[in-house]
């Protein structure tokens, strides 16, 4: 799909433009926020508290279901899944229990899965940008799509 304002009636061209930009916005938003911040996933599950700026395990203690956690739960044995779910129901997890959940996520590649999903949303957003003629603005939007996934903080 190419957006050409002179070919279609103006209202159709503007509608196509708005819908395309909305799609790109949604895809970029999903890329950066698929159940949380991809950088935080890496830090939470591979631990670097100074970089994250909050206590390791805070999301786990709050029972938040991030995409790495969801992916892990789909991959572990039923008994392990039940164990993790029972831990997440509690809000007083100790360091050993947080470490147990983190080990499951790391062993079952939950972070890698979540980051792959975020990259796929970014790729989809950049593909939608091909509806626009090459320009500096289009390149900037493509960089934004990459940035929301690869940012350091």
Image (cartoon, helix red, strand yellow):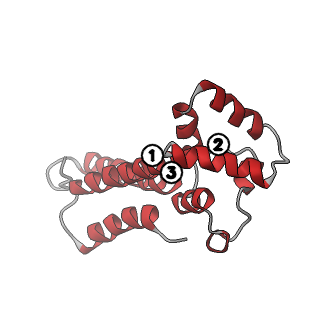
Structural crowding at the residue carrying mark 1, measured as other residues with C-alpha within 10 Å and reported as few (<14), some (14–19) or many (≥20): some
Where residue 32 sits: x, y (%)?
Answer: 49, 57
Q: Rounded to the nearest whole Å, what is the CA distance between mark 1 and mark 2?
A: 14 Å
Q: Which residue is mark 2?
A: 65
Q: How far apart in space, not on screen, are marks 1 and 3 (Cα)?
A: 5 Å
Q: Confirm or deny contact between disc 1 and disc 3 (CB under 8 A).
A: yes
Q: Is residue 21 left or right of residue 37?
A: left
Q: Are marks 3 and 2 in contact (CB under 8 Å)?
A: no
Circle 1 residue: 113
Q: Residue furthest right?
A: 92
Pick whichever, 22 or 4, lies toward us: 22
Which mark, residue 111? 3
Q: 71 or 132, which is in the foreground?
A: 71
Q: Point out which mark residue 104 bears.
A: none
- Above or below for 15 versus 57: above
Point out residue 31 in the picture as x, y percentages from the top left corner: 44, 53
Name the residue rendered at 18%, 51% in the picture: 2
In the visual, does 54 lie left or right of 9?
right
Compare marks 3 and 2 and give the one earlier in the sequence.
2
Please report the residue visible at 85 percent of the width from the left and 48 percent of the height from the top: 92
Q: Residues within 10 Å of mark 2 (few under 14, many from 20)?
A: some
SS class, disc 3:
helix
Q: Residues within 10 Å of mark 3 (few under 14, many from 20)?
A: many
Q: Secondary structure at mark 2?
A: loop
| Placement of the C terminus among the 4 image quadrants | bottom right
Viewer-nearest of discs 3 and 2: 3
Q: Nearer the viewer, mark 1 or mark 2?
A: 1
Dots 1, 2 in contact, CB < 8 A? no
């Amino acid at each position: 799909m190419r957006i050409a304002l002179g070919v279609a009636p103006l209202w159709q061209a503007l509608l196509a433009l708005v819908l395309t930009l909305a799609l790109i916005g949604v895809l970029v938003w999903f890329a950066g926020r698929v159940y949380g911040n991809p950088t935080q996933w890496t830090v939470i599950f591979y631990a670097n508290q100074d970089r994250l700026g909050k206590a390791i395990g805070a999301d786990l203690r709050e029972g938040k279901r991030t995409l790495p956690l969801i992916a892990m739960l789909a991959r572990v044995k039923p008994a392990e899944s039940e164990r993790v779910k029972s831990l997440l129901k509690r809000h007083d997890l100790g360091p050993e229990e947080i470490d147990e959940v983190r080990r499951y996520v790391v062993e079952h590649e939950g972070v890698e899965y979540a980051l792959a999903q975020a990259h796929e949303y970014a790729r989809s957003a950049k593909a939608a940008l091909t509806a626009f003629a090459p320009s500096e603005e289009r390149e900037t939007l493509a960089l934004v799509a990459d940035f929301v996934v690869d940012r350091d903080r």
